[in-house]
């Protein structure tokens, strides 16, 4: 397996990017050195720990709180995909785990445009950032195999890549491999 | 709301507690351990909350919070924080700890340490007595549910109450809530947390931040599901295995077994036939599904049963288990009888011919049956009739009449395949009784218009015929009791469980066990004596008769369920016959029969990107493998490497080449050859004194870990995984050589030289271990290695630890390379050779290119010769004469077929059939293909759209769990559309639908 950048380094960078995208200050965002967990001191004695909790708190403080969902159903759906990012995507370092992440998100997105609802939410942003390292390493053949999640990713990067200082990843427009059965 | 959960899943506690707390109405659905509920998740993930139809919350934490928010909405960042802490930090170690205690009975100290740290943190955070400002919030239920199993019952962390007083008071408050007690009642009955074991063992263990799973010591690792069977995953060669950590205990154990293990090493057991069960031992009866006699098995058939069972039984022998491996050809039934009529010989002669072909193929593949029998032996008749009488006596045989066609001239009822006529659905006038070649639909023989007897062309009449039925519903309870016990303790592949369960869930119906045929076991019951048993009633009895032909004390194996474990190896298409019908026969006979305990069913093996096809000559068939010039062991290795264990996999020549060159040649072969060459060239072929350093013992510890995993995988019949253990050991060996560089040492000082001696002698011992481990997979290669090493015969036992087998002073033989490189041109050649004809329908255009006069002439000749043969047969002429004329007829037919560009036919009335095929052509062109075979793009587009639309409809119906009949009819429409699409694209529709449609032509 290729050696990936340690996930927590990415976490800090992406949270800072997210904060600037949302137009909120991330001044009190630090890394708990021992546990390697991002910690946000949000004022009023509130301290939030963990990528998902910090990201949600940043959204809460921003002018677009609807990104974390408006109805209870939406919020729950977004929450579970956020959890999926930290327990599944970030921890899939082996090929077979990576494959199952790709397969499952691909299957889900074969019937959905976004992870939740009809417009991008925090779930899309956080999963886009989390899946980035996996997509960087995909071959074109694999991209053709996971066509739905690639379509989604390509859509997401057109929305967020520049704002989140991510390089664009190339996707093919046509099927270029025959006989792979997909 | 609907909650799906498996039994005893502690993660359901929180969700149920929340549901009870809010008082919302919900239903609880208990599903199987590995059942998939969420359609887009490929792995198991329970519990799942279905919020509204088809909307799932697969995260129990989110579900819990969602439920509570229904009652009292919150958006508290502190709850975010605790839920994230629980899922990211606590769960991975908590689950590992629970698995180690409840499943492996060996507490994992590392997980426990991490848990203690986390509890300490929680305790400090709880000094304000509550997790958040909200009382009884999601964080409370989520943490309570996770901590319950480590605070109460079998896996309790001793002394936690004293250590974590803040947690204690918080926990007790939550624990005493009535909703939590209700949840406990539903999940952990009576507070005994050992009932969580099965679920813990099945649900995926949460991933760790930096963990790579293979690094876990074996005793901790739970069986991993192979999620993706990619044929070509190449290991990164740079990855260093030697740097993996080993615990001091592991190193100590490795040291001891190396130094003193040989005294404990068991002696190989001598196998004296006949092998019979012995009390107090593991007695394994291993069967491979009986191949049907009149087909030449292809590589998929071979890996599906005989080869898999062979590897397992060779492994068992090396473990000194008392085991018997039996198989044979399945010979009775319509197919044989039809084929015999076509070839103008008796069924017995057909069977003799093909039984020999089978035996030769398995012999070449080095399949080590203890007995390869056949079902057409007297023992079979005796035992089958005996079982039948017992079933009859116990009241499990019922009688019913069935409408069937009877030929007035042949004076017999016609099996479906023996009837021809006009299809009632599409009007195609050459349909067979079981299926129409025109539209591909399955038919009932009595539905045919203008039915004709295939043999004499007489007109059959509908008559009712009395038949015997095995009354499965009456035996169902016995079967369920047996299966439930076996599912619990036996090794059953997932597909075997799923298929069996779905059969039982759909309700068992009486099954007809008699047929109006001649070639079979006569039904002994009065009034039914002109009938024979249905081939699937008698085929599995072949296992018993094979054992009976092996030893007259066969009842020690077959009427001994207490002492004998029965292992069935088979392809998944045979599962219901082995797990439902045959067990029902045996249980119904109530004669203390040994009934299946373990079942390993494989999925399908494809060939390149298509299916194996006899008629098109696609793929490698048993007898052709020999002609490739590649040794049987290489085929064995590759087939086992891609064994379709949990998903269909495929045989690919490119991958075959890659695996041979990278794994066998560069890894395994390279290591063994290198080690032996050093011993031979630098040390005169003599094993040297070995003074092992701590680094060497570290290597031994890593080898022992692979060895334990190899044994574990074999016990679970994960044959693919055990190969990987072997390859890891030789990879370790290669890296060990590379790290120690004996070629440098040997030129150095005296002590350097001694070190070189140790390194290469240890490597030679490692080669000895490999030669034993590789034996089930590649027996001939194993022999070669052992010949080169001159290993003592006593080493041929698989023991749980690596011990020194070649002592200092042992002289080895002459090393030579074990494997040959397979070059690309060779692979290209083989690929082309076995590619087969692309699509049979193209033949039609060829026919028009042929000389029509010549065709006509030959057609007439064939007809004339055919008449002659029929006359001779009718007159009961001498056999030799008939055979000679038949041979002439066949030669003529072949000539004709060549001219028409057709595969050689073997059966009768070619002339009429060809004419019909010509007349059928316009019908094909109407659905997309124009007369010259060009593709009509518009039509293709239209059909593609229709297929995808229909596909969606079917998926939706399935997910809504619509009525089965409704789904079936929509699936039929879908298949039909796909077939049309394939035709329109100029492809062979048969490739899609698995051998429907073109079969008639073959005969």
Image: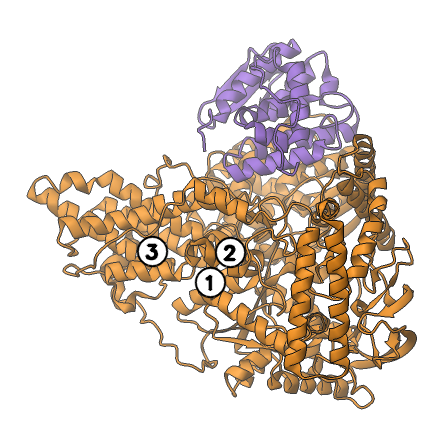
Q: Chain of mark 2?
A: B
Where disc 3 sits, the SS reads helix
Answer left or right for B892 relative to B308.
right
**Is B400 situated above or below B419?**
below
Task: Look at discs 3 and 2 and give the one toward the viewer.
Answer: 3
Residue toward you, B191 or B550:
B550
Q: Earlier in the sequence, mark 1 or mark 3?
A: 1
Answer left or right for B40 relative to B87.
right
| Chain identifier, colour purple | A
**Is B534 situated above or below A2?**
below
- Picture coordinates of residue B828 (x, y %)? 49, 42
| Quadrant location of the C terminus of chain B in the rendered image | bottom right
**Is B846 situated above or below B586?**
above
Residue sitting at x 59%, y 79%: B544
Per the image, the residue denoted by label 3 is B770
Q: In the drawing, what numbered circle is on residue B718?
A: 2
> Which image quarter: residue B492?
bottom right
Tell me the colour chain B is drawn in: orange
Residue B131 visible in the snapshot: no
Q: Chain of mark 1?
A: B
Residue toward you, B858 or B481:
B858
Residue toward you, A16 or B662:
B662
Distance of label 3 from label 2 (alpha carbons): 18 Å
Q: Residues within 10 Å of mark 2 (few under 14, many from 20)?
A: many
Distance of label 1 from label 3 (alpha carbons): 21 Å
**Is B245 situated above or below B351?**
above
Answer left or right for B297 relative to B919.
left
Where disc 2 sits, the SS reads loop
Task: Look at discs 1 and 3 and give the one toward the viewer.
Answer: 1
Q: In the drawing, what numbered circle is on residue B365?
A: 1
């Amino acid at each position: 397996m290729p050696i990936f950048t340690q996930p927590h380094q990415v976490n800090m960078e992406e949270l800072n990017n997210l904060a600037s995208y949302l137009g909120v200050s991330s001044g009190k965002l630090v890394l708990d050195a021992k546990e390697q967990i991002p910690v946000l001191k949000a004022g009023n004695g509130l301290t939030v720990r963990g990528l998902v909790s910090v990201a949600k708190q940043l959204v809460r403080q921003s002018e677009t709180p609807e990104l974390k969902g408006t109805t209870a159903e939406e919020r729950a759906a977004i929450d579970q995909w956020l959890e999926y990012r930290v327990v599944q995507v970030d921890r899939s370092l082996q090929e077979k785990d990576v494959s199952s992440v790709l397969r499952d998100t691909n299957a889900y997105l074969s019937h959905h445009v976004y992870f939740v609802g009809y417009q991008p939410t925090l779930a899309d942003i956080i999963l886009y950032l989390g899946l980035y390292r996996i997509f960087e390493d995909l071959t074109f053949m694999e991209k053709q195999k996971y066509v739905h999640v690639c379509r989604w990713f390509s859509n997401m990067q057109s929305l967020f890549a520049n704002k989140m200082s991510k390089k664009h990843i190339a996707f093919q427009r046509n099927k270029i491999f025959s006989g792979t059965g997909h | 709301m609907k909650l799906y959960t498996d039994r005893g899943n502690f993660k359901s506690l929180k969700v149920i507690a929340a549901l009870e707390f809010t008082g919302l109405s919900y239903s609880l659905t208990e599903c199987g351990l590995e059942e998939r509920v969420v359609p887009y998740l490929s792995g198991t993930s329970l519990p799942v909350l279905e919020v509204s139809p088809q909307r799932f919350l697969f995260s129990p934490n989110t579900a819990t919070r969602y439920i509570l928010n229904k009652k009292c909405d919150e958006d508290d960042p502190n709850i975010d924080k605790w839920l994230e802490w629980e899922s990211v930090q606590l769960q991975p170690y908590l689950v590992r700890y629970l698995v180690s205690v409840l499943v492996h009975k060996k507490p994992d100290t590392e997980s426990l340490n991490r848990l203690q740290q986390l509890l300490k943190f929680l305790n400090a955070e709880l000094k304000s007595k509550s997790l958040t400002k909200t009382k009884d919030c999601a964080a409370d239920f989520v943490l309570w549910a996770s901590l319950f199993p480590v605070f109460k019952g079998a896996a309790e962390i001793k002394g936690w109450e004293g250590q974590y007083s803040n947690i204690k008071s918080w926990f007790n408050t939550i624990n005493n809530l009535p909703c939590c007690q209700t949840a406990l009642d539903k999940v952990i009955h009576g507070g005994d947390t050992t009932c969580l074991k099965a679920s813990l063992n099945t649900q995926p263990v949460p991933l760790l931040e930096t963990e790579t799973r293979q690094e876990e010591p074996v005793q901790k690792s739970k069986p991993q599901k192979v999620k993706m069977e990619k044929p070509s995953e190449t290991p990164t060669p740079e990855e260093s295995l030697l740097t993996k950590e080993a615990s001091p205990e592991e190193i100590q154990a490795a040291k001891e077994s190396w130094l003193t293990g040989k005294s404990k090493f068991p002696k190989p057991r001598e196998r004296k036939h006949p092998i019979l069960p012995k009390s107090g031992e593991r007695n394994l009866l291993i069967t491979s599904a009986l191949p049907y006699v009149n087909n030449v098995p292809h590589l998929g058939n071979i890996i599906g049963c005989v080869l898999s069972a062979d590897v397992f039984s060779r492994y068992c022998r090396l473990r000194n288990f008392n085991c018997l491996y039996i198989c044979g050809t399945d010979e009775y039934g319509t197919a044989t009888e039809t084929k015999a009529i076509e070839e103008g010989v008796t069924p017995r002669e057909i069977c003799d011919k093909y039984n020999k072909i089978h035996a030769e193929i398995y012999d070449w593949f080095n399949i080590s049956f203890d007995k390869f029998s056949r079902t057409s032996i007297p023992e079979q008749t005796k035992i089958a009739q005996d079982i039948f009488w017992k079933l009859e006596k116990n009241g499990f045989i019922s009688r019913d009449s069935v409408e069937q066609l009877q030929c007035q001239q042949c004076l017999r009822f016609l099996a479906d395949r023996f009837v021809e006529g006009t299809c009632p659905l599409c009007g195609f006038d050459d349909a067979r009784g079981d299926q129409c070649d025109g539209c591909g639909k399955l038919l009932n023989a009595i539905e045919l218009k203008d039915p004709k007897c295939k043999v004499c062309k007489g007109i059959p009449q509908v008559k009712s015929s009395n038949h015997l039925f095995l009354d499965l519903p009456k035996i169902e309870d016995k079967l369920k009791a047996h299966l439930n016990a076996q599912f619990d303790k036996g090794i059953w592949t997932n597909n075997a469980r799923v298929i069996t369960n779905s059969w039982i869930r759909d309700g068992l119906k009486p099954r007809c066990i008699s047929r109006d045929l001649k070639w079979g076991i006569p039904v002994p019951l009065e009034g039914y004596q002109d009938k024979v048993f249905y081939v699937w009633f008698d085929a599995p009895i072949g296992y018993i008769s094979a054992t009976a032909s092996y030893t007259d004390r066969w009842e020690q194996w077959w009427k001994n369920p207490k002492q004998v474990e029965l292992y069935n190896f088979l392809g998944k298409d045979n599962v219901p016959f082995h797990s439902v019908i045959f067990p029902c026969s045996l249980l119904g006979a109530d004669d203390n029969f040994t009934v299946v305990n373990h079942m390993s069913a494989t999925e399908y093996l494809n060939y390149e990107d298509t299916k194996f096809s006899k008629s098109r000559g696609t793929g490698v068939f048993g007898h052709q493998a020999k002609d490739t010039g590649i040794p049987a062991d290489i085929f064995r290795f590759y087939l086992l490497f891609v064994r379709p264990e949990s998903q269909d996999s495929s045989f690919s020549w490119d991958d075959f080449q890659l695996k041979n060159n990278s794994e066998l040649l560069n890894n395994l072969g390279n290591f063994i050859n290198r080690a032996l060459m050093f011993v031979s060239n630098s040390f005169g072929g003599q094993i040297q004194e070995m003074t092992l350093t701590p680094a060497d013992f570290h290597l031994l510890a890593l080898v022992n870990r692979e060895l334990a995993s190899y044994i574990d995988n074999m016990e679970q019949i994960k044959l693919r995984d055990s190969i990987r253990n072997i390859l890891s050991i030789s990879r370790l060996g290669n890296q060990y050589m590379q790290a120690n560089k004996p070629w440098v040492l040997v030129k150095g000082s005296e002590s350097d030289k001694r070190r070189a001696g140790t390194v290469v002698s240890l490597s030679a011992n490692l080669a000895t271990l490999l030669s034993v481990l590789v034996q089930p997979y590649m027996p001939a290669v194993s022999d070669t290695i052992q010949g080169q090493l001159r290993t003592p015969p006593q080493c041929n036992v698989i023991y749980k630890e690596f011990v020194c087998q070649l002592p200092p002073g042992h002289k080895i033989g002459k090393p030579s390379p074990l494997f040959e490189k397979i070059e690309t041109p060779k692979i290209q050649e083989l690929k082309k050779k076995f590619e087969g004809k692309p699509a049979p329908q193209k033949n039609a255009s060829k026919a028009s290119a042929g000389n029509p006069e010549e065709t006509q002439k030959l057609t007439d000749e064939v007809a004339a010769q055919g008449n002659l043969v029929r006359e001779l047969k009718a007159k009961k002429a001498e056999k030799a004469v008939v055979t000679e004329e038949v041979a002439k007829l066949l030669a003529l037919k072949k000539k004709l077929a060549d001219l028409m560009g057709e595969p050689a036919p073997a059966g009768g009335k070619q002339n009429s059939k060809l004419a019909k095929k010509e007349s059928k052509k316009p019908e094909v062109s109407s659905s997309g293909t124009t007369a010259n075979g060009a593709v009509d793009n518009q039509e293709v587009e239209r059909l593609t759209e229709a297929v995808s639309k229909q596909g969606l409809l079917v998926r939706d119906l399935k997910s809504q769990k619509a009525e089965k009949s409704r789904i079936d009819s929509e699936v039929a429409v879908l298949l039909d559309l796909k077939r049309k699409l394939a035709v329109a694209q100029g492809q062979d529709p048969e490739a899609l639908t698995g051998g429907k449609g073109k079969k008639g032509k073959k005969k």
